[in-house]
Image (tube, helix red, strand yellow):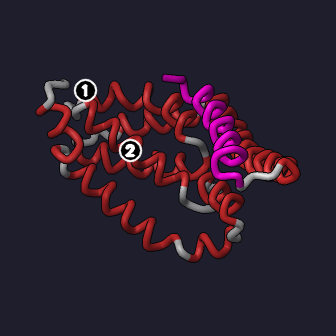
Amino acid sequence: TFPPTEASVVAVFYALICGKWIYRTLQWSALPGILARSAMLTASVLLVMATSAAFAWVLTVEGIPQYLSELIVSWDLSPTMFLIAVNILLLVFGIFMEPLPGVMILVPILAPIAFTLGIDPTHFAMVVIVNLTLGMITPPVGGLLFVTSVATRVSITDLTREMPLFLLAHFIVLCMLTFIPALSTWLPHTLGFQ
């Protein structure tokens, strides 16, 4: 077994060996073009991630997540209303930042509040993850839209035109997860995880 980064390197060499000597479809002359396309795809993704990370840094330095969490606490919300407020907050943040910075910045602030309100940690984690991944496919930033656009050579405009039904389905799943905690807690609790 390999960690993810090393596994990707092994997969590249495996594909190279299979393409050249097993399937005999890869020509050495095509390798520079393949490497250039891979570099372009990687660079476009990293540019979006860098912009998102810079925005996350500005938000953190300005103390906006802490301010918003204090604002939510000051409203003295019920658990359901708290989850609705968290959904709105995470959807807005998820549009402009990657999930990892979003989790690192917002979860340490919001999770203790959720725990205090009696919200199951597994339930809260699922709500956070689905919210932030929804942001990854939501314009204007939508990091996954850029990756898909470069990989498939379909314009962002065409991709965005096809997004409403996917966003609606994702939003319905998010609402179900938010208001029916058993959807995210039943299986882990059945298997003995608390």
Q: Main secondary structure of the magenta part?
A: helix
Tag 2 residue: 86
User: Who is closer to the viewer here, 58 or 132?
Assistant: 132
Counting from the top left corner in percent of width and height, residue 28 is at 84, 47
Counting from the top left corner in percent of width and height, residue 141 is at 64, 55
Tag 1 residue: 116
Tell me the residue at 55%/29% (across/down).
Answer: 4
Tell me the residue at 37%/66% (across/down).
Answer: 169
Question: Where is 149 relative to 111, above or below?
Answer: below
Question: Where is 69 relative to 158, above or below?
Answer: above
User: Who is closer to the viewer here, 145 or 20?
Assistant: 20
The answer to whether residue 120 is left or right of residue 149 is left
Q: Amino acid at mark 2?
A: Val
Residue interval drawn in magenta: 1-24
User: Callout 2: few (<14), some (14-19), or many (20+) C-alpha neighbours within 10 Å?
Assistant: many
| Circle 2: element type | helix
The answer to whether residue 7 is left or right of residue 24 is left
Q: CA distance from mark 1 to mark 2?
A: 14 Å
User: Who is closer to the viewer here, 29 or 9?
Assistant: 29
| Circle 1: element type | helix
**Does residue 150 show up?**
yes
User: Who is closer to the viewer here, 87 or 167?
Assistant: 167
